[in-house]
Amino acid sequence: MRRPHCAAVALTALVIAACAPGSGSAGGDAETPYGAGEINTDPASLGEVTLTVWDQEVRGGQDAQIEALNAAFQDEYPNITIERVSRSFEDLQATLRLAITDDEPPDVVQANNGRADMGAFVQAGLLTNLDPYRAAYAWPDRFPTSILSYSSYTEDGVTFGEGSLWGLPQMGEVVGFYYNKALLAQLGIDAPVTWDDLDAALAAAKAAGQLPLQFGNLEAWPGIHLFGAVQSRYTPADQIRDLGFGRPGAEWTTEENLQAAQTLVDWVDAGYVTPEFNGITPDDAWQAFAQGEGVFMLGGTWLLADLMDAMGDDVGFTVLIAPGTDMPVATGGTSLPFAVTDATEDADAAAAYIDYITSFDAMEIVTEKGNLPVVEASEQQVSASLQGEAFAAWDAVTGSDGLLPYLDYATPNSYDLLTAQVQALMAGETEPSEFLEQLQAEYESFVGG
Amino acid sequence: MSAAEAQTAASAAAADRSARRERRGAPPGEPRRVGYVYVAPALVIYAVFLLFPLVRAVQISFYKWDGLTLGGWVGLRNYADILADPALRAAFGHAAVLVVFFALIPTAVGLVLASVVARARVRGLTFFRTVIFLPQVVAMVVVAVTWRQIYAPDGPINDVLRFVGLGDLARGWLGDFDLALPAVGMVGTWVSIGLCFVLFLAGTGKIPRELYEAARIDGAGPIREFVSVTLPAVRNEIVVALTLTVIAALRTFDLVYVTTGGGPGNATTVPSYEVYRRAFELGAVGSAAAIGVTLTAIILLLNLVIARIGEQP
């Protein structure tokens, strides 16, 4: 038995020493030179092309719009065939790293904006820089800067929110306050426009024995949104952007952020939010809100369709104006941007596809299928009042450059840290100052190193 | 040729063949290398799908690797980080708590249940056995979703508490920093009891009634009977039950992923959840592999210890 044993050990050592993980991957190789003259913006002239597209548009209206657009694109350019691979968000997140480092990766992928995904891919040289196409297709005429910044990184992947363009989104997302119109009318209050209005409305609701703010935080991500909303009331927008994009120059441990953290604690103490919120799922929360439990609920536009179904015209949506300004500011973002892989041989066709599915014509189809189009929202014909309010809110926020990034974009670890910390803060396990010190430590270790 | 004659002829031929083999001096099974042909199919599959990934995981655990670019050798630093990182140490601590809920409590309860059943004839035993075993059959994700509803602030547990006038105890169990981990553990207890009970029932079933009768004649009470008759008889079943449930406890992922996502705060995060989180969310593949390898080593070690229980006379 001795010899085989030694052989096994030797073999193991050989395997371990043989090749470092990642040495066989496609990324990080030669720099592709970019020249405006080399690109072709006429898809019809590209010959027979098959584009493999990985997307996560699997839910009802999302799936319907991408199916419609894929069909229209192939009708218009019969020489291009689209092979669609659709996966749920979680499945895509779990498999994209393997797929994109494969020898033959997909041509177009939907890559999440944050550093752990798009940022890491840019850093590894796995995506095509879309700057030449940005100029050729005049994308800045279509998209406001704040939208483009969500899929912009410097070429080294280090700085988020500026630099080159790596993808384009189809839909917008903004987090605002849904309100129950019937309950507000009972209280004799108009829909709030400013934060002071909200304060008054929350107090009035409490006094009338209503639940002021429906909130379910078992899955922990709603906490990021609630803190982000309250933070936007106190902290200047450019500071939040630096914190959210993980850029140097800002601080968590400021008086304004402390006020924001304290406000959340005060709301819990005053009984403004649902009791035992850390034990309630977000789905249960919005369903309770739809049944009339709660005057307000903070939520993203992804709940539009569900709440319209459940409440009809009885529900409204608003984003609030921060003190000292006259325009609304709100946390939000885009749907996952579509990006072109570096290894694709059909970058021109891939870029043409992305241009097509984010065009003004495409936005009509996006709307028609019940989604919030990332641009031209106020131009769209909508029937339901809630949809109209949400589209107007989105246009107001993006038009005034008031869109703030999700705070968990900041560093790869931010999501876990923030979700856990907001749960602890609101449960009284962590003091507001301690809460901010934790975030500051993570932020410093990231921007400093 | 009659059947009897044929049989005789066949056995004569067989005797002749074995005599020939003996004459050649080759014992059965020779040449020994032939054995490898028999194990080859299983071995190849085992090697490709288990040994290779294991070796590869060990290899990756020595690198700092994001899953995208070329990894960099860091030696044992990923392992040192496991010891140094209080959040990770906490995750392993939570796994230890889960062992109590998944393995120790169900084993104890299962033993008591089985010995009670062994002493008396229970009407409808098959029915109860099925019901108690049922949680084992249901997919863990379904179990987790169900229990999330049960633990909800307006779920059945709190409803009952309020109904019996203990409304002060009602709470969002999974959102409570102190109670979330025990709450998750109780789900494990509920799942594991069935397995333990059925295993021990099988074990007690083969104990001859005479042994109990003899014990009773010697003046043994129920407890003495349990310690002297039942317990030694089901030692092997205990080993099996502990092995299975300890592994289930340490590799818990789906239950935590669905019920709490590691929260509130980090109160219920466990090593396998950290493996997933690091590999797929944070892009820290090397660190994830190190946690996975450590967890594997711990499970192996614990199982060696458990196996010793069965060996003792």
Image (spheres, coloured by chain):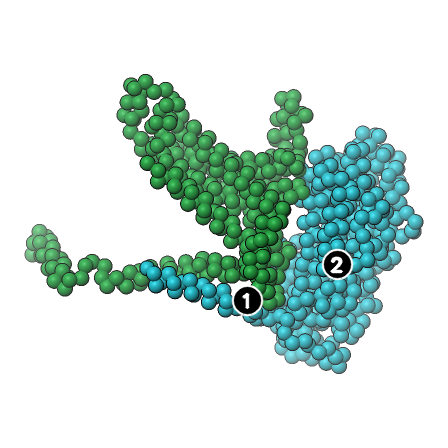
> For mark 1, what is the residue?
A20
In the image: residue B146, left or right of residue A114:
left
Asked if A163 appears above or below B138 in the picture, the reply is below
Q: Chain of mark 1?
A: A
> For mark 2, what is the residue?
A447
**The C terminus of chain A lies in which quarter of the figure?**
bottom right
Q: Colour of chain A?
A: cyan
Q: Amino acid at mark 2?
A: Val
Rendering coords of residue B224 (x, y %): 37, 23
Rendering coords of residue A122 (x, y %): 69, 66
Identify which residue, B91 or A126, lies in the foreground: B91
Residue at x 58%, y 35% (from the top left corner): B182
Can you tell which quarter of the image residue A198 is in? top right
- Same subunit, labels 2 and 1: the answer reads yes
Q: Secondary structure at mark 2?
A: helix
Q: Chain of mark 2?
A: A
In the image: residue B95, left or right of residue A234:
left
Chain letter, green in picture: B
Q: Secondary structure at mark 1?
A: loop
Rendering coords of residue A226 (x, y %): 77, 45
Characterize the local packing of mark 2: few (<14), some (14-19) or many (20 or more) Cα atoms within 10 angstroms: some
